[in-house]
Image: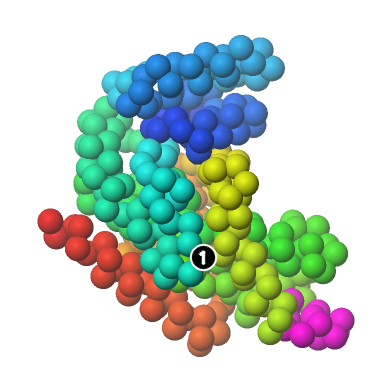
Amino acid sequence: MLAMEGKAMKMGIIGVGSVGSAIAMAAASRARVREVVLVDRNRARAKAVATDMHYGEALSPLVTIRDGDYVDLADAGLAVITAGINEKAGGATDRSDPAGRLRLLDANVAVFRDIVPRLVKAAPQAVIVVATDPPEPLADVARHLAGHDRIVDAGTYLDSLRFRLHIAERLGVGPDSVEANVVGEHGTSSVFLWSSARIGGMPVRELLGRRKIEFATFRKDVEQDVRFANITIIEGIGASQYGIGMVCARIAEVILGDERAVFPVGSYNPRFGTTVSLPSIVGRQGVIEVLEPEMSDDERQGLERGAARLRETVGKYLSR
């Protein structure tokens, strides 16, 4: 806790919709942040959420939750941006649409052009965590607007957790025993790293062979469940919020506590000329180092194709 004392223990959440509220609740429940400031263009909404959670603060005595404006983000160690059009409102819930979350980019770039300069003016030293879809292109836009590299997007962290869970459930092990990552884009071009997926050090593919489970069918079923998990959730409750809330709360505590934990998140990668998600060492300044995992030739080519697509897509906005 000593590393988290003082200014670094303050975080802001910009956008207090379903995802922003879920992040705030997860952060408060984990009790690893001292102050959470909720900022929303609808101040009444931010105040209502803060007030509602305020009544439970006695159960998390180290946490103060309040509504505020950008000026109240001064001295925050990080700010999470969740504001923007979500998948349901933006019409990005068609499983057959190759654009996927990229369909939301036009509307959400406009939102970021309003938010990011105001955030940077109020909290110039804060790490910015992008949780709005599509996260990788919007992280590039945020980096351009902020003028610094302390930009992290939640990227494929949640995809990787879903990947591990679906493998674990099918093979009858705990998800924390599965080492498997999804890289590239939190979207239709994401790459599942089956070549490095392991359980207890044993390659998943080898374990499947031992149990006489056909790999191609297993792979297809797992990838389909992971790729469309968000749409399935949206069809049931209108927004995919709780998983990403827990993920962003974890990212926040790793940054504020300078934990140097490793998980797949997005950051600008000079090699690809755009933001992509890869396993990364994360600490006080955001992404400290990117670790490139073992990949097959097909997986590496998939990552490169996805990065090229992202680079081309976001380039249209950065040149304006």
Left or right? Give the position of 38 relative to 201: left
Residue 285 placement: quadrant:
top left
- Out of 262 and 81, give the one closest to the viewer: 81
Q: Return the x and y of residue 267 as percentages of the image width and height.
A: 39, 57
Left or right? Give the position of 317 relative to 97: left
- At 32% from the left edge and 26% from the top edge, which residue is drawn? 41
Q: Tell me if residue 240 comes above or below residue 205 in the rendering.
A: above
Main secondary structure along the magenta-highlighted residues: helix
Magenta stretch encompasses residue 212 = yes
Numbered-mark total:
1
Q: Return the x and y of residue 211 as percentages of the image width and height.
A: 87, 81
Q: Callout 1 environment at 10 Å: few (<14), some (14 to 19), or many (20+)?
A: some
- At 69% from the left edge and 17% from the top edge, which residue is drawn? 59
Part of the protein shown in magenta: 203-215
Q: Return the x and y of residue 272 as percentages of the image width and height.
A: 33, 71
- At 56% from the left edge and 54% from the top edge, which residue is drawn? 230
Q: Quadrant of the C terminus?
A: bottom left
Q: Which three-letter amino acid code belongs to the residue tagged 1? A: Arg
Residue 123 placement: quadrant:
top left
Q: Tell me if residue 159 comes above or below residue 257 in the rendering.
A: below
